[in-house]
Amino acid sequence: MPALAATATPDGASIAALLCPLLIILIVVTFCYGIGCWIWPFGACRKCHGTGKRRSPFGRAFGLCRRCHGDGRRLRIGRRLINSFRELHDKGTR
Ligand SMILES: [Zn+2]
């Protein structure tokens, strides 16, 4: 008796053909983001949008941004990861 395998799910080869380009794109994007974080480690502070100043709600008085201490910069997430991996590597190879 012939086996009639009529299923709605695609076979393994087509799933692999679908996921392989996505995986390659994901790896390339992650690699490019890592290089970007290595070259440009700082981004604009999200609280003050890079100005380093903090305005009062009424717009009269202003001081230094409390989150970035007046720098207007923050360390990017990818750079923070690179730094933690580097620290881990330094501790492991001491
Ligand atoms: Zn700030």
Image: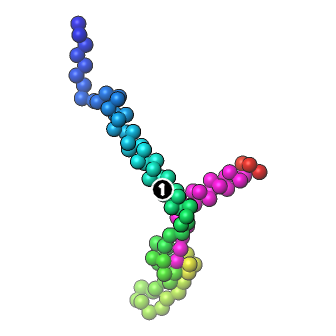
Asked if the stretch drawn in magenta spans residue 80, the answer is yes
Left or right relative to 46: residue 86: right
**Span of residues in magenta:** 72-91
Q: How many neighbours does mark 1 have within 10 angstroms: few (below 14), some (14-19), or many (20 or more)?
A: few
Q: Give the labeled residue for mark 1.
A: 32
Percent x, y for residue 41? 55, 66
User: What residue appears at the point 77 percent right and 51 percent down from the top-left corner?
Assistant: 94
Please say whether residue 85 is visible from this viewpoint.
yes
**Element at badge 1?**
helix
Q: Which of 31 and 11 is in front in this view?
A: 31
Q: Can residue 77 be seen in this view?
A: no
In the image, 89: left or right of 27? right
Q: In this view, does 70 lie above or below 41?
A: below
Residue 60 coordinates in the image, percent (x, y): 44, 92
**Which residue of the protein is positioned furthest toward the right in this rendering?**
94
Query: What is the tally of numbered marks visible in this picture?
Result: 1
Q: Quadrant of the N terminus?
A: top left
